[in-house]
Image (spheres, grey):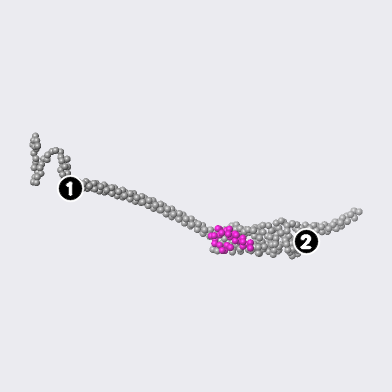
Amino acid sequence: MTTMLGTSAPRSIGWRLPSFGAGLIVALAAIGSAVVVEPTELAGKRRLGQVVGSEPLGPGLHFRWPFVEQIDRLQVSLETYRLDHLTVNTIDNQPISLAVGLSYRIPSPAVLKLLYEVGRAGNFDIGENFARVIADRTAKVFAQQNTTTISEARDRLSTALKALLTQDLRALYGIEVVDFQIAGISYSDSFRASVEAAVKAKNEAVAAENTVNRIRFEAQQAVARATGEAEAKLRLADADRQAATLLAQGHAAAIRLEGEAHAAVWRQSAEALQLSPLLVDMARAERWNGALPQTLIDSKAALPLLSVAGQQPAR
């Protein structure tokens, strides 16, 4: 009895091992046949290397035949592709290092093309193609710019590159460009040195011009002050001259009036003498003090007159 049980147990275990292995294989195959596509993804399906369907698979749970079918997922949400060390040359042959960023979104019609026509099948292998397109278009735009005007034209250049990349990436890959930004601009050491020298020279020129303007202003102030003083002196001299002229004219007028008064008196006296010669005698009589003259003047000599004391004049 013991012998029979001992021989039957290994046989039953031997029959169960293949069943367990088959079940395990089936379970693993069932687990591997389920694929979840995330909300930010779309996917494509291949069967024995051939693309199945003309539309991508949307988010959710999808099944595939194990070892026969393959589901390739692709991120389609908003993404940013960066180039941090892109070197371009300007029209004046100056090298510039740029950091640029491209924000893009993959629309549904472009998914299968990007999965199976760009790069290796089943992989989003577009990075190198992005880099070539961005570098080429950026180099073309910057090759038309002068280095000294790039900083002030930064927004305009970003807008121009966004329009150009939107057109070309849509045509090449069906990608929707959302934004393009020039994140950084680095100039060469020689250009920075030349800019610093130019700025220094400009500052020195401005300082020299300010000095010249200050000296010119001070000279103008001195001229204005001297002109004012000269005008004041001229006005004072003119006032003195006018005062002297008026004084002289006043003296002359006084002398003239005095002469005219004397002349009038003499003229009136002459007219009076012509009218009455006795006026002279009358004037002498009015001025005689009653004393006789002491001398008598004749035609030859002056004779003294002797007065007689107590003699009364004859009546």
Q: In the image, residue 242 lies at what x, y percent?
A: 31, 49
* Amino acid identity at mark 1: Gln
The residue under the point 19% across, 46% down is 272
Picture coordinates of residue 285 (x, y %)?
15, 41
Q: Determine the image quadrant of residue 307.
A: top left
Question: For the residue carrying disc 1, how many other residues have a C-alpha within 10 Å: few (<14), some (14-19), or many (20+)?
Answer: few
The residue beneath circle 1 is: 274
Name the foreground residue: 297 vs 216.
297
Mark identifier at residue 88: none
Residue 237 lies, with reference to residue 293, above or below; the image says below
Q: Is residue 240 above or below residue 45?
A: above
User: In the picture provided, is 286 more to the left or to the right than 79?
Assistant: left
User: Residue at horizontal 21%, vertical 46%?
Assistant: 268
Q: Secondary structure at mark 2?
A: loop
As drawn, is 175 to the left or to the right of 310? right
Q: Decide if residue 39 is on the left or right side of residue 276.
A: right
What is the three-letter code of the residue carrying label 2?
Answer: Trp
> Which quadrant is home to the C terminus?
top left
Q: Nearer the viewer, residue 243 or 1?
A: 243
Residue 178 at x, y percent in the picture: 64, 58
**Magenta segment range?**
141-167
Dot 2, crowdedness within 10 Å: few (<14), some or many (≥20)? few
Distance from disc 1 to disc 2, alpha carbons, whole Å, reads: 172 Å
Element at label 1: helix
Q: Which mark is residue 65?
A: 2
Q: Given this view, does label 1 or label 2 mark the residue nearer the observer?
A: 1
Please name the predominant secondary structure of the magenta segment in the image.
helix
